[in-house]
Image (tube, rainbow, N blue to C red):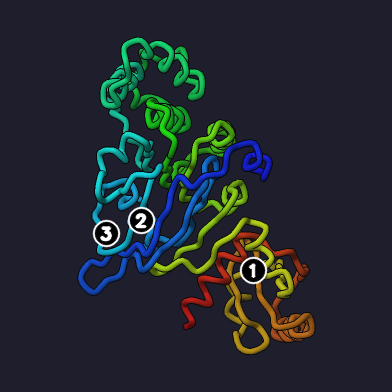
Amino acid sequence: MCSDIIRTQIDMEEKIVVKGLKKHFGDFKAVDDVSFSIEKGEIFGFLGPNGAGKSTTIKMLTGLLLPTEGKALINGESVFKDPEKVRENIGYMAQKFSLYDDLKVQENIDFYTGIYGIERSLIKERHDWIKEISGIKGFEERKTGDLSLGLKQRLALGCAIMHKPPVLFLDEPTSGVDPVSRARFWETINDLAHDGTTIFITTHYMDEADYCNRLSLIYNGKIIANGSPGQLKEMLADTPIFEIKTDDAVSLMKKIELGKEILEKYYFGQHVHIVASSTEAADDLRESLIKVGINIKSMDRIDATLENVFVSLVHREREK
């Protein structure tokens, strides 16, 4: 959905630059020496488990939280020296949509028109644009709280980009939204990126991470991997990963012992994925599981997915 074509159709320039960013709360290091840069028109995914430091990073980059140390430039402006100037150049959409449920749809749009100081001559054009990209035309007089979650999501996005900012921050914007709404949302994100908007997005959905141009994986406040989706998958390209299908995944997990031969195990939906040191080690595991009464329906080697990479890297960090 997001291809390298996007990056060749735009002028390449850094819109977000982060160097040595830290945020400590007492002895707790929520963000610990994070650095990255994002170019114009890129969709940059920032991934990590709960508590990894994603939201703290976004709050610092949007000027809502001062860092303990480090530098950050948004559209060439220092976030920490001139936060007001930075806010003029960014849009921000939180997981809990910043909408007023007791207001009508049109009233929410009017409110954000005022917040962003849209010039009077541009108001109608911007309103029509927001209604088009969000698909809420015809719902203007409906109470916002009565909208479906998908419509709320698109309305929140529309309000966040009312002023057409060059940089857009999205904090888990599709959480809880149905698959059809998620797909439509990503179509809009791609259109924005194609037109040059730089997008910084956090998400828990690994299939969505595949839509990004580049990714950073953060764990315990530190970035543990960077690269395109393809580059990250290459990290496990030579590692034997197997998907085991059985009637009782819980019992299966209990019977798999980790060590030098079987490096990792984790649930993957109703199945179990293992990372083995070799194909022979996986074959030996299969035989031992059958001997202890585990019904193995199938055990197939699979290509690494982003979820495999994500889980594998987090497991390795936990074992350090």
Q: Amino acid at mark 3?
A: Pro
Residue at (32, 30) in percent of width and height: 99
The 10 Å Cα crowd at callout 1, few under 14, some 14 to 19, many 20 or more, is many
Q: Amino acid at mark 1?
A: Val
Q: State the residue position of label 1.
A: 272
Name the N-terminal-most of marks 1 and 3.
3
Q: Is residue 164 left or right of residue 302?
A: left
Seen from the viewer's position, the closer of residues 38 and 204 is: 38
Residue 208 in picture, x, y percent from top left: 57, 48
Circles 3 and 2: CB atoms closer than 8 Å: no
Numbered disc in front, either 1 or 2: 2
Seen from the viewer's position, the closer of residues 227 and 270 is: 227
Q: Secondary structure at mark 3?
A: loop
The alpha-carbon separation of the residues under discs 1 and 3 comes to 40 Å
Q: Is residue 244 left or right of residue 11?
A: right
Residue at (54, 51) in percent of width and height: 205
Q: Amino acid at mark 2?
A: Thr
Q: State the residue position of label 2.
A: 57
Residue 126 in picture, x, y percent from top left: 42, 17
Numbered disc in front, either 3 or 2: 3
Q: State the residue position of label 3.
A: 67
Residue that extends furthest to the bottom in the rendered view of this protein:
260
